[in-house]
Amino acid sequence: MSVILPLTEAALHLPARGALIGLDLGTKTIGVSASDPDRKLATGVETIARKTFTADAARVLALAAERSAVGFVLGLPINMDGSEGPRAQSTRAFARNLGKLTELPIALWDERLSTVAVERELIAADVSRKKRAAVIDQHAAAFILQGALDRLSRL
């Protein structure tokens, strides 16, 4: 069973090098991103259409194995006032269940406004609404992971 901690505490359980997998958990999809082994840059990997937890977790773990990942960063959707609502509880439940299937540490990272920021970037880049819908989740996962990487680099 893995440890599930806020990012700065989870950092103590991560090796010095190795890719991290970032997840943006939505109700219908899971955006997946990955970092390079030196943890400088996060890139979008894929968007998983959610089915069952078992199927979703199997795909997430397969992507982590393909990249020899050493940990996960899950975006935790905290409300603007700092409280946690149903989506944050759902994310914590996903983390607990995923933690039963892997030894890799799971870090929780405040993802406030990540999807909004990514949507703005895609609109600014003149990406069509249809194309935005197809990539926004993995871009949001990359945005979340990049924020976490930037924070880790300052520890």
Image (cartoon, helix red, strand yellow):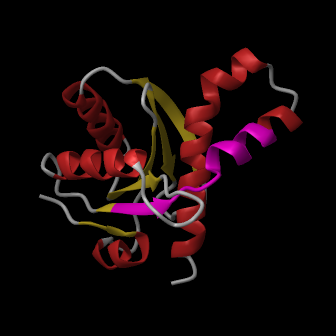
Is there any visible trace of residue 22 in the rendered image?
Answer: yes
Quarter of the rendering occupied by the N terminus: bottom left
The residue located at (33%, 50%) in the rendering is: 89
Residue 144, image quadrant: bottom right
Q: Considering only vertical position in the picture, is 101 above or below 27?
A: below
User: Which of these two is toward me, 46 or 23?
Assistant: 23
Is there any visible trace of residue 43 in the rendered image?
Answer: no
Left or right for 56, reference 145:
left
User: Which of these two is toward me, 11 or 5?
Assistant: 5
Residue 79 belongs to magenta span = no
Q: Considering only vertical position in the picture, is 153 above or below 41?
A: below
Residue sticking out furthest to the top: 130
The residue located at (30%, 53%) in the rendering is: 92
The residue located at (23%, 31%) in the rendering is: 53
Can you give x and y, in whole percent of width and height, for residue 25 in the image?
43, 40
Residue sticking out furthest to the bottom: 155
Q: Total label count?
A: 0
Magenta residues (range)? 107-121
Can you give x and y, in whole percent of width and height, for residue 56 in the image?
29, 29
Can you give x and y, in whole percent of width and height, for residue 86 in the image?
38, 46
Left or right for 126, reference 131:
right
Left or right for 117, reference 1:
right
Can you give x and y, in whole percent of width and height, for residue 74 in the image?
41, 53
User: Which of these two is toward me, 129 or 42?
Assistant: 129
Q: Considering only vertical position in the picture, is 54 above or below 146?
A: above
The residue located at (62%, 51%) in the rendering is: 143
Q: Considering only vertical position in the picture, is 122 above or below 155?
A: above
